[in-house]
Amino acid sequence: MADPTASAAPTASAVLPTYARADVAFERGDGCWLEATNGQRYLDFGAGIAVCCLGHNHPHLVDALIEQGRKLWHVSNLFRIPQAERLATRLVEASFADFVFFTNSGAEALEGAIKTARKYHAAAGHPERFHLITFEGAFHGRTLATIAAGGNPKYIEGFGPKAAGFDQVPFDDIEAVKAAITSETAGILVEPIQGEGGIRVPSPTFLRQLRALCDEHGILLVLDEVQSGMGRTGKLFAHELVGVTPDIVATAKGIGGGFPLGAFLTTRKAGSGMGIGTHGTTYGGNPLAMACGNAVMDVLMAPGFLEGVARKGLVLKQRLAALADAHPKIIADVRGEGMMLGLRTHVPNTDFAVAARAEQMLVIPAGDNVVRLLPPLVADEAEFSEAISRLEKACQKLEADLAAKG
């Protein structure tokens, strides 16, 4: 369907056209709301694809950024960076990990996690063990290694030979995983909840079974929590929901609250091969990024905050289930955990996103014909009510379009 919020002739741009961008631009934000350059206000339930976990213009995050910005932006990792040491300590204390490496993005965090898993075996005298088992529907980033790990042909095509070392199997199929393990397997790389793949939640036992397989075969469990981590599911990391302890976790998106930041976390054992000179970064862990990361942790780790995310996420999911019941021709099912939710639609998900945007609400298309709802974790029940009202109108318009087509 046509997008009534888009102008007929978007202004030509010098930006490389790798995105089919909606002709809407935003100039300011406040909490769950964005204001476009034309003055229209949008309810943002995309949060920059799960990035703006504290919403827009959060006062604590803004104050931290300004305070650090007036002192020091960047020094290289040739020197100690106290802000990075503090954030690493806080992440370690709140998680399974012993060490943290900071990056600029989720793809870089995954690259580091992949290298760490491979190096662990090489350092133990088994360089042939560099393969990672990955899953259909996965998304791990857009670098040459991470597109190979994700396995989506449309992302791989045209960029030369696929990077070696990734063996893909169906998601949530433990027997397929067992069959894929060989003497070259270094580990299993999996999203606890597939985000780009369509908010696909595996069976509750799947991650536990993967952990048991890793222990049995002496391989590593590597989790991609770029989208599901940093409080999105009501836990700091989604793997906590099922009581699984990983060896390595990559995270990003919400960790910086909108400032470019990623990290991979590792146990001492899994990271034992990563000594001096094995990995590096120019910008990762610089003082400005670390000020933002620490500010985010201040909020996430405040008493009751994550519990509130879990509670609010359940409320939102129930409200969405009622919406689906009222509009069965439009919404097929509701899925997800916490405030990482999805609607699988009977109409094209891009049409649903356009219809929502016409009601000045932002949602994010994903695989499996799903639209994602990834609101800021600070969203409240009044904003949920507003979201449901706007989605209701979008559903009604889509139903009218279906009726008109006969």
Image (cartoon, rainbow, N blue to C red):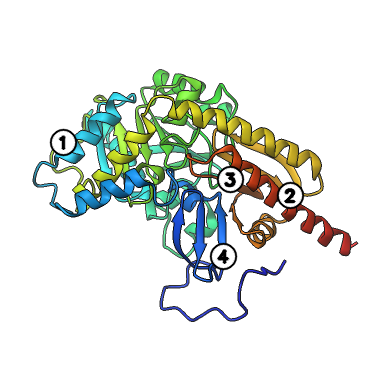
Evaluate whether residue 222 shows in this view.
yes
State how far apart marks 1 and 2 are (Cα): 55 Å
Identify the residue under disc 2: 392
Looking at the picture, how far across and down is residue 146, in whole percent? 41, 49
> SS for tag 2?
helix
State how far apart marks 1 and 3 are (Cα): 40 Å
Q: In which quarter of the image is residue 80?
A: top left
Vertically, is 309 above or below 329?
A: above
User: Residue at image x 58%, y 45%?
Assistant: 373
Residue extending furthest toward the left: 79
Vertically, is 65 above or below 326?
A: below
Picture disc at residue 374: none
User: Residue at image x 51%, y 26%?
Assistant: 178
Q: Earlier in the sequence, mark 2 or mark 4?
A: 4
Looking at the picture, how far across and down is residue 131, in whole percent? 39, 38
Picture disc at residue 275: 1
Picture disc at residue 373: 3
Dot 4 surroundings within 10 Å: few (below 14), some, or many (20 or more)? few
State how far apart marks 2 and 3 are (Cα): 14 Å
- Give the number of the mark in front: 3 or 4: 4
Q: How many marks?
A: 4
